Amino acid sequence: MIPTAASADPDEIAFEAIDAEIFRIPDLKTRLNVLQNYFFPRLERLLRLFAEGVRTAYGIDPYEHMTVAYRPAHRKDAVRVKDLGEVYIGLTPGRGDVPLHVLHDDGTAFKYSPSYLLIVVNSEGALQIVFRPYYYAVDQAFRERFEAAVEECWDSIGALMEMTRIAADVAGSWIPLRGSLLGPCQWTSPLIHFPVSESAWLGLLSFPFVALYSLLDTGARLARGENSRLPELIEALKANAEEPTDQEVGPGPDEEEKSVRTAAEPSALPAGDDGSPVLPELDSYRMIRDGKWYQILARDNFTCCGCRRSGPKDGVVLHVDHILPRSKGGTDEVANLQTLCAKCNLGKSNRDNTRLTQA
């Protein structure tokens, strides 16, 4: 069974449509700082969930010889910063004690294996798994060793990649997967656009991540001069994928996307006179000007004014709330706004004018 992260609280790893507006903050340093504090906590939780899927599928330590890669990675006080238009977190082979068997164009050996497996958020507001076998130009001999290892298992790999809808992207052009590893390319899962929450979308990302980890491992081992263990990993993955499971990996071709919550779980929403759930009014942070929205988040140090959990530390989803609700005459003035996590905001709703900000 390939874990699909269905055990995670979807409210804690949700992405709203407005989240993409962070990419359009005018000031570069402010933009990168907010991207780090706002996206990284949730992406870190996703990485831990997907790494556990790797452990279950292959029976190996996903962090063996691996280190965490992330972007943006600037220091707050850096003189120069650069925005490359995406946020990511993922795994890349770590630095070892021996020279690597993969060379730069000038013939010098790499210190780090130049391959990455990433959870990417793009500037349009979409999530995607991306495997970059060579983040930098590498020597032809290494590319051929990598290609040969993949070709040996192609029948199984091709079927797995087709099942997870992985495609090869070379300079913005889609090409057949087979043979694509010889040039600069990346293998990508389909884009999942914001908003995403309370659905099977986690499985649509976790399975591609787990499947592509086998290729990340292959590149790392070949770079260290070791033999590929790709055939064993592919067989382990196939065996786990074929085990029966009650979890949803994703909607079938004729099915609608199913909620992670089961029908047996009680609704957390208040009931109306007819007994049906009443959706709370949570329009506050969706209606606030973008500049003021992230200004409030920064003022409150990306921390919920109710439960005191923070985005960077606890990975909670943060909203900007009207203390006096808009429906009761509340304004968008800074004094009437506070940062709340998704759960505190849901609990408060538009039913009161509770000021949760602590002095």
Image: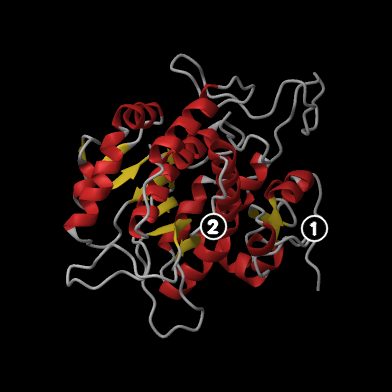
Quadrant in which the N terminus is drawn? top right
Answer yes or no: is residue 170 visible.
no
Is 272 left or right of 252, judged from the image as shown?
right
Percent of width and height locating residue 103: 24, 66
Q: Nearer the viewer, residue 189 or 78?
A: 189
Question: Do residues under tags 2 and 1 come within 8 Å of each other at their CB atoms?
Answer: no
- Point out which mark residue 120 bears: none
Secondary structure beneath dot 2 equals helix
Is 186 left or right of 31, judged from the image as shown?
left
- Point out which mark residue 307 bears: 1
Percent of width and height locating residue 67: 50, 62
**In the figure, residue 150 lies in which quadrant?**
top left
Secondary structure beneath dot 1 equals loop
Residue found 58% across the figure and 31% down from its top:
199
Mark 1 Cα shell of 10 Å, populated few (<14), some (14-19), many (≥20): few
Answer yes or no: is residue 61 visible.
yes
Mark 2 Cα shell of 10 Å, populated few (<14), some (14-19), many (≥20): many
106 is higher (above) or lower (below) than 195: below
User: Which of pointers 2 and 1 lies earlier in the amino acid sequence?
Assistant: 2
Q: Please state which of the two labelled residues, at mark 2 or mark 1, is closer to the viewer.
A: 2
Find the distance from the CA under tag 2 to the CA under tag 1. 20 Å
236 is higher (above) or lower (below) than 52: above
345 is higher (above) or lower (below) than 92: above
Percent of width and height locating residue 137: 22, 62
Q: Nearer the viewer, residue 152 or 75?
A: 152
What amino acid is labelled 2 in the image? Phe
Residue on which disc 2 sits: 39
Is 192 left or right of 199, judged from the image as shown?
left
